[in-house]
Image: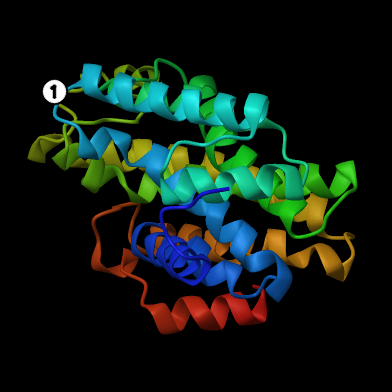
Amino acid sequence: MTTSLSETDQNSYLSGEVKRYDYDRWLATLYAPPSARQGIFTLLAFHAEIARVRETVSEPLLGDIRLQWWRDAVNAIADQGKPPVHPVAEALAEIIPAYNLDPVMLLRMIDVRALDLDPLPFETTGELLDYADQTGGLLNSLVFRISGGTEKDGEDAARAVGKAYALTGIIRAIPYHVAQDILRVPDEMIRAQGLTADSLFSSENRPAFFRIVEELTAKARHEQETANRLIANRPKSEKPAFRLASLTSLYLARLHAAGYDPAHRKMDVGAVRKIVVLSLGR
């Protein structure tokens, strides 16, 4: 296969992209078996590409075009083994057969990112939970496979870990998303407080906003408890795909300590603290 970069340059590029745009998962990957790391970095670089579409385009139509480019790329790899000339697509063409990854799962991850182009995508809490599963959950189940996992129970546990981490990440990112005119808080939660998306962030409604965040955090904590139950008796060899659970617990604890204010300085967690938590696995 012709590549646009040498293998060394390609590996450096993929790792660098993940470190830049998905630092937590980059750190967690450093605890994976050395033989699996480059495959995981490739998958995470693909995820970073589709997750960043909303913030790299000026209008939804351009985002749709970009997502369709990635659908076409995955289909070309699946049907012909011929990716477009793009370092992430080229690397993806190598790991799909190498780890027997299902292209349908990758296409599903692309499709759900169309919701990112909607400024208010979720009507119900169920829709938000499904989004967390189809993004972080699917992604982590693929990380499990690349890490050498084969058992369905282990993959289900990895998917639960990824879902809980994704949901917690959505809560933490509320201030960032609002600055981009995106609101991933379910509309039913906003209406339950007698508010609208436009009035949610006014100063007089801050207590109501914190109540919503507390409710979302309770949902995330429930997902985390489910994940912890599923991983409790899994073999040590599967642990690389479960590392993110320790960061999820850290962030949930910080949200509680911050009074459910995702913009509070307590939500700024340094790299050293993350490394310690990942190393201890709790």
In the displayed structure, does residue 266 sit left or right of residue 178? right
Residue 77 in view in this figure: yes
Structure colour scheme: rainbow
Figure check: 3 above or below 189: below
Residue at image coords 51%, 80%? 275
Figure check: 226 above or below 276: above
Q: Amino acid at mark 1?
A: Asp
Image quadrant in which the C terminus is located: bottom right
In the displayed structure, does residue 42 sit left or right of residue 101? left
Residue pointed to by mark 1: 198
Count numbered badges in the picture: 1
Splitting the image into 4 quarters, where does residue 37 fall? bottom right
Splitting the image into 4 quarters, where does residue 35 fall? bottom right
Which residue sits furthest front? Answer: 2
Figure check: 192 above or below 206: above
Residue at image coords 31%, 68%? 268
Residue at image coords 44%, 51%? 87
Label 1, secondary structure: give it: loop
Residue 215's spot in the image, x, y percent?
45, 38
Residue 242's spot in the image, x, y percent?
70, 60
Which residue sits furthest left? Answer: 203
Residue at image coords 51%, 71%? 27
Residue 128 in view in this figure: no
Question: Nearest the camera: 18 or 221?
Answer: 18
Question: Nearest the camera: 99 or 22?
Answer: 99
Residue 105's spot in the image, x, y percent?
65, 30
Figure check: 237 above or below 213: below
In the displayed structure, does residue 31 sit left or right of residue 186? right
